[in-house]
Image (cartoon, rainbow, N blue to C red):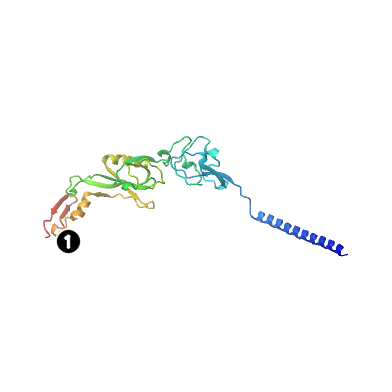
Amino acid sequence: MIAIAAVFGGISIFAADWWINSTANARLDALSASMIKDSGPKVEFKTIVVAAEPLEFGAPVERAKLNEIPWPPKSLPEGAFTNIDELLADGERVVVSPMVMNEPVLLSKLSGPGGKATLSNLLEPGMRAIAVKIDEIAGVGGFVTPGDRVDVVLTREAETAGSPDTAGGSLATQVVLENVKVLSVGQDADEKSAKPNLVNSVTLEVTTEGARKIALARSVGALALSLRSPADRAPFDSGVTTVRDFNRMATDQFVTSSAVTVEEAIESYGPKVTTVIVTRGNKETQTYEVMSDN
């Protein structure tokens, strides 16, 4: 009787354990199915070509430097490649815009099939490239690098040459072009380059009108670059600075109208006045040198 009771007790325990496990698994399966149903449609992935290592300007795009990673098809950037064979199908390309590791390789960052890393690949549609001759001073000490924004400043002969108020020279300076992008410094077109470089020319991206202005400015005077902040959105500076402006600061010149006498000007501006310029009717100009404090 004890043996029979032990056998039936073991069978009961086994049956109970089997029933509990079956019930628990059924409930887990039902819960998993419900979670999958509530999570929405399943996302399918395609592939996109990315850089397997940093790619510098002018580097050839080779298979060993590329990689394919999963990417949602609806989020593919414009100009992206889905596989390496598609990218290299028409011939070897070169990098015209530097890329970091795992950055998607886009058509806008590459030359055409069999192309070269030339400045023409860097130009925006409708823009032109023109070179400007500079020296260490005009080039901001070599701190102008590709991708920077500059103003082009022209120094030329003033139109008022021979006027008595241009003593010491007849030069004038004005801004010819403003907020111009630097394409290359010398032969360096890598926008990642930050090392100061002393060169004798820079290449700028300008409009057709801007190209005409620079071509004319090169023949009438000396050009210099004024480096500006990337966030600077100041309005165009159309002012002109002449030697007369410097004479006013250096010799304390003062311009008076015909209603003010020389004595009144000296008394108003103090004993530091050395020169008084009197303009009558905007035509006749007379300059008086003050010999003493009185």
Residue type at mark 1?
Answer: Ser
Name the residue rendered at 26%, 41% in the picture: 220
Q: Position of residue 155 (x, y in %)?
A: 26, 45
Q: Please, is residue 50 above or below residue 291 in the view?
A: above
Q: Quadrant of the N terminus?
A: bottom right
- Left or right position of 218 against 33: left
Residue at the image position 79 percent from the left and 60 percent from the top = 14
Q: Nearer the viewer, residue 48 or 270?
A: 48
For the C terminus, the quadrant is bottom left
Secondary structure under the numbered disc 1 in the rendered image: helix
Relative depth, front residue between 69 and 164: 69
Side of 218 relative to 261 (left or right):
right
Q: Position of residue 24 (x, y in %)?
A: 73, 59
Residue farthest along the front direction in this orientation? 3
The picture places residue 127, in percent across and down from the top left corner, at: 39, 41
In terms of depth relative to the viewer, which is nearer, 22 or 37?
A: 22
Q: Nearer the viewer, residue 294 or 187?
A: 187
Residue at numbered disc 1: 268
Q: Is residue 254 left or right of residue 150?
A: left
Look at 50% across and 41% down and name the residue there.
65
